[in-house]
Image (cartoon, grey):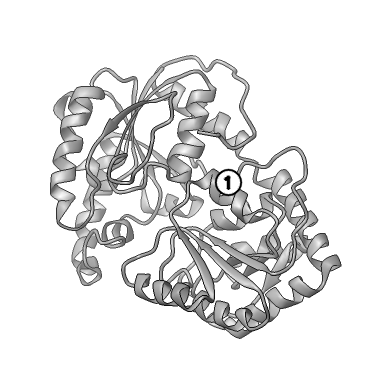
Amino acid sequence: MRVCVCTIARHPEDARVLHRQIRALLDAGHEVTYIAPFRACNVTPWREITPVDVPQATGRRRLYALRAAKRALAEHAAYADVVLLHDPELLISLPRSVRRRTVVWDVHEDTTVALTERGRLLRPVRPLLRPFVRRLEARSERRHRLLLAEEGYRTRFARPHPVVPNTAYVAAEPPMPPGPGRAVYVGRLSAGRGAHEMIELARLLAAAGVMVELIGSADPQVRPALRDAQREGILRWYGFVPNDRALRIAEGATAGLALLHDEPAEGRPVPAKVMEYMAHGVPVVTTPHPATVAVVKPSGSGIVVPFGDPRAAADAVLELSKDVDLRTEMGKRAYETARARFHWAVHAEEFVSQLEAWAGRSPTPQPVSTEPHAG
């Protein structure tokens, strides 16, 4: 099966796009053409794929990037069995030759939020954008196939669609036990994801000799504060790091941070970062989002702290750093829970089989790797 994957807004090494979905397709023996902003993100493509470079959709270059993607899709997707799109704006101007193919939209997040975050459009336009988004989603549902990243997205659509959740690779062998003196965060840094609270947390922990390490790209609104904190020496901010390498950095940490804000969370699953911490045997320090609490508390794999309370989060990290038995037991339970509930290999097979079915091909059983790709 020939699959053409396209994104202009996401990093080419996005964990869901590259490290989960594309890798699953490659492991199953399929051909992948990947249209993405490699040069803009200074990324060397994997040898196993056919890369097509396009500009990244940021700021005023969005229309330019969209036109480049349309040309690339017309040239490289017209003969694909499946065209897999990861940005909602790509649905607006699909080339006529591509519309006749099996087009799949992977719905990562709320479409209105997706179009207004990361500098795509200004937040004040959200109310004006919603009617357009509803029409776009309805039209896409009529014309294309949809994959959903979360169960909660089902209510946005008239018909049922398969869900391919964001889970994690969980190795068969237990990871190293968590050590003292280091708290980590993996993922995009934004105000809503607790960036400012983590800066304050880092300031509190630095006085006790505990380092906070933030691994991920940052929204423009929080970058100045992160740079100032790094110059102050209270934290390390790595910027974007490919998912497999980011998780190698995180392994052995005292705690994995998930200090999301108190926002509507009905239907939202456990954040991918929480599953990744657990898969690597790292105890979780999290705010009380219902889905996360439902996993962390019964399994004893972390500590829940109040929303917007850096002091409580600092106390939780210090408790884990000082108590070797507590963090070792929590790390062990985190790994065992992740292995039982969040192993991506299971979902990888379902994802590949679904694309094969849509392409009209009989699924061919293939061995699915359980370890992160070396690139």
Q: In the image, is residue 281 above or below residue 364? A: below
Q: Is residue 166 visible?
A: no
Q: Residues within 10 Å of mark 1 (few under 14, many from 20)?
A: many
Q: Position of residue 140 (x, y in %)?
A: 27, 41
Q: Which one is nearer the viewer's eye here, 57 or 106?
A: 57
Q: In the image, is residue 375 above or below residue 101? A: below
Q: Is residue 164 visible?
A: yes
Q: Which one is nearer the viewer's eye here, 155 or 212?
A: 212
- The residue carrying mark 1 is 167
Kindly state the secondary structure of the residue where label 1 is placed. loop
Q: Position of residue 149 (x, y in %)?
A: 46, 47
Give me the residue at 25% from left, 47% from top.
56
> In which quadrant of the rendered image does the N terminus lie?
top left
Q: Position of residue 156 (x, y in %)?
A: 37, 53
Q: In the displayed structure, does residue 150 sit left or right of residue 300? A: left
Q: In the image, is residue 33 above or below residue 157? A: above
Q: Which one is nearer the viewer's eye here, 134 or 15?
A: 15
Q: In the displayed structure, does residue 374 sit left or right of residue 263? A: right
